[in-house]
Image: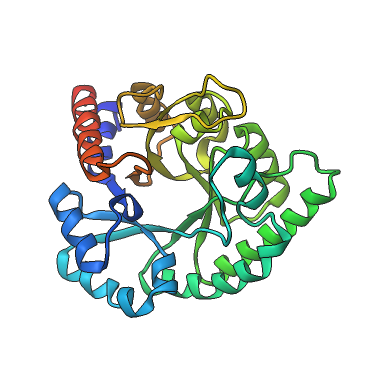
Amino acid sequence: MKHSEIYSCFLTRLAVCSWSLRPSDPADLASRLQDLGILRTQLDLDPLREQAAVWGGLPAVLADAGIEAVSGMFRTVGEDYTSLDTIRRTGGLVPDATWSANWANLQLTVQNARRLGLTIVMTHAGFLPHDPSDPAFEKLLGRMRQVARLFADHGLTLCCETGQESAAALVGFLDHLAEPNVAVNFDPANMLLYNNGDPIAALRCIGHRVKSCHLKDATVTQVPGNWGEEVPIGTGQVDWSAFFATMAELDYRGYFCFEREAGAARGADVAAGRDYLTNLLLTKS
């Protein structure tokens, strides 16, 4: 298939991260997606576990609205994104204090994912140790293997989201893990927010491990140790032309999920990002 045809196909695989729209219930989510004209979503699975009375009817609501759930996401207990330091200490499967609660939550998460017909679920695993001789490396490897095999038992691929380490460190960890159902959810903006390398170089490094991705933009911080800034798509430092060209070279077959986690007008920002990237892809096709 020619690159121009691939770019046209990319437009048929746009989706929206449900949490970006901050819906109050399934009907609200369906309405917001219909307003955007994008009838595919990457679902936040936590509300189904935490607010079953509100979200239990989600599969039927999505089906009635003609909306496809293309993948899912879960958070871990106690995550604190106040600063890079707090998320390093509290994020993912790394902290001992929250591991038991996270493992218990995952028993319900995998069941909800299968009830929705999902095959891919992503998360931030936490800041991965880089040195295989570090005891923390082996401990996290064991936890990730335990989660990966739980997911495999339910026919699910577990995608680790990028950003909290360099692409090379992530690939090295996954090589040691060697679980066939563990892949990557690539977020180009996160590479900038965490100041962990050029997004396009990172994408090429991770390569065919990418099975899911986010569409989000950002700028690198000018103050070492601080967050970068998430900004609307097209106003940041992600080279979107190079991003899609690289995805075409990789023959990426997954979905492109708009994510917006900052700002007061997130739905409008997603709509603007949709228009910006649609125009870009139409120009290329």
Residue at 38% x, 46% y: name it. 254
**Residue 219 percent coordinates (x, y):** 44, 24
Relative to 261, does residue 1 appear above or below in the rendering? above
**Left or right placement of residue 101 versus residue 40 in this view:** right
Vertical side of 75 occupied by 89: above or below: above
The N terminus, quarter of image: top left
Furthest toward the bottom, the residue is: 53
Q: Is residue 1 left or right of residue 145?
A: left
**Residue shown at 31%/32% (left/top)?**
232
- Give whichever of 105, 254 is nearer the camera: 105
Q: Is residue 60 above or below residue 36?
A: below
223 relative to 247, above or below = above
Q: Is residue 37 visible?
A: no
**Horizontal side of residue 198 vs 128, given as left or right:** left
Q: Is residue 206 left or right of residue 3?
A: right
Image point (84%, 45%), residue name: 134
Residue 85 drawn at (x, y percent)? 64, 40
| Picture quadrant of residue 281 | top left
Residue 121 visible in image: yes
Q: Which percent across, then down, holds residue 163?
A: 55, 37
Q: Quadrant of residue 48?
A: bottom left
Please name the residue shown 42% across and 65% down the image.
Answer: 45
Q: Position of residue 144 (x, y in %)?
A: 66, 58
